[in-house]
């Protein structure tokens, strides 16, 4: 697997590259976004790991270029500025994850391994039309996503090992959102769970939060908010 590491801070770039090489990856380094874009046209990469704030071209510029010219190439961004407009734009444009600096290498390695799997976001809602609409919004930003209309179907899909984030309605017939959360915690604990509901279910929300749910969204779910929440989940930045 070939990874393009883009970072204008030389010491951090060298450290990241060395650690990734120790993990068995082939690493190519770029000192800024402009150089990264040039390399993307010259070589094949399986993943881009880039800082956001850089001279000449930002990490978001690299993300947008990759989306246009190399669709399907996962991009993980790094930044010390979690609230800046560039971060929000990256999340809205389908970045795989945003890592907050400073971080230990384990955090970066985890995001890299996750991204290289090309995992799927699974949307679960007994309102099939709503689930499909949310999936289409994710796909339009370049995020791989699938929809199912029941908790039972969700469990079957989760068993495939392709899912890393599950977005589920709390209130469904049969296997409810609560039941699904419990199943995930027991059987597929590596899957991050985001739940949503159109009802004010404080006690249920408290229970799923205690069970390790990453975030709660209210219906109607805003597509941009969902995109940002998925990117935060994959970067390990909790939104409770």
Image: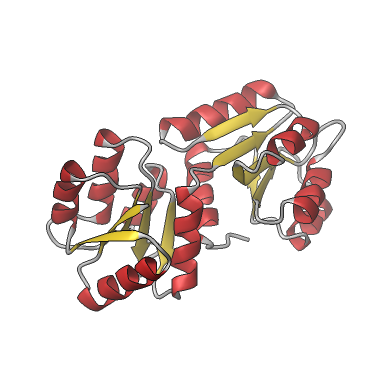
Residue 71 screen position, x and y as percent: 33, 35
Q: Do we see residue 51 in this rendering?
A: no
Report the quarter where the C terminus lies. Answer: bottom right
Please indicate whether residue 24 sits to the left or right of residue 56 in the image.
right
Residue occupying the far front of the picture: 24
Which residue does the image show at 62% across and 37% down from the upper left? 122
In the picture shown, does residue 143 fall above or below 211?
above
User: What colour-coding does the image apply?
Assistant: secondary structure
Q: Residue furthest bottom?
A: 11
Q: Residue furthest top?
A: 129
54 vs 105, left or right, is left
Which of the two residues, 228 or 37, is positioned nearer the viewer here? 37
Toward the viewer: 18 or 227?
A: 18
Rendering coords of residue 174 (x, y %):
87, 32
Residue 21 appears anywhere in the view: yes
Residue 172 location in percent, x, y? Answer: 80, 33
Depth check: give the residue in front, 104 or 81.
104
Left or right: residue 198 compared with residue 144: right
> Image height check: is 126 above or below 42?
above
The residue at 75%/30% (across/down) is 153
Q: Quadrant of residue 32?
A: bottom left
Q: 187 or 18: nearer the eye?
A: 18
- Looking at the image, residue 76 sits to the left or right of residue 51; the answer is right
Q: Position of residue 195 (x, y in %)?
A: 68, 46
Q: How many marks?
A: 0
């Amino acid at each position: 697997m070939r990874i393009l590491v883009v970072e204008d801070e030389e010491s951090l770039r060298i450290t990241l590259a060395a650690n990734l090489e120790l993990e068995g990856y082939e690493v190519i380094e770029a000192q800024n976004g402009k150089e990264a874009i040039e390399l993307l046209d010259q070589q094949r990469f399986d993943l881009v790991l880039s800082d956001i704030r850089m001279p000449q071209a930002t990490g978001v510029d690299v993300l947008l270029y990759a989306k246009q010219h190399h669709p399907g190439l996962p991009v993980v961004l790094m930044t010390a500025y979690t609230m800046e407009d560039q971060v929000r734009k990256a999340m809205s444009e389908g970045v795989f994850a945003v890592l907050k600096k400073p971080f230990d290498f384990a955090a970066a390695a985890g995001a890299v391994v996750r991204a290289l799997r090309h995992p799927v976001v699974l949307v679960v809602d007994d309102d099939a039309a709503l689930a499909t609409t949310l999936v289409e919004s994710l796909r339009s930003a370049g995020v791989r996503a699938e929809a199912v209309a029941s908790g039972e179907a969700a469990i079957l899909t989760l068993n495939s090992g392709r899912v890393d984030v599950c977005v589920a309605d709390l209130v469904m017939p049969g296997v409810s959102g609560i039941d699904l959360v419990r199943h995930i915690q027991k059987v597929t604990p590596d899957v991050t769970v985001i739940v949503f509901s159109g009802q004010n279910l404080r006690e249920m929300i408290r229970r799923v939060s205690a069970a390790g749910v990453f975030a709660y969204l209210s219906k109607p779910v805003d597509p941009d908010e969902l995109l940002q929440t998925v990117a935060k989940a994959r970067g390990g930045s909790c939104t409770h």
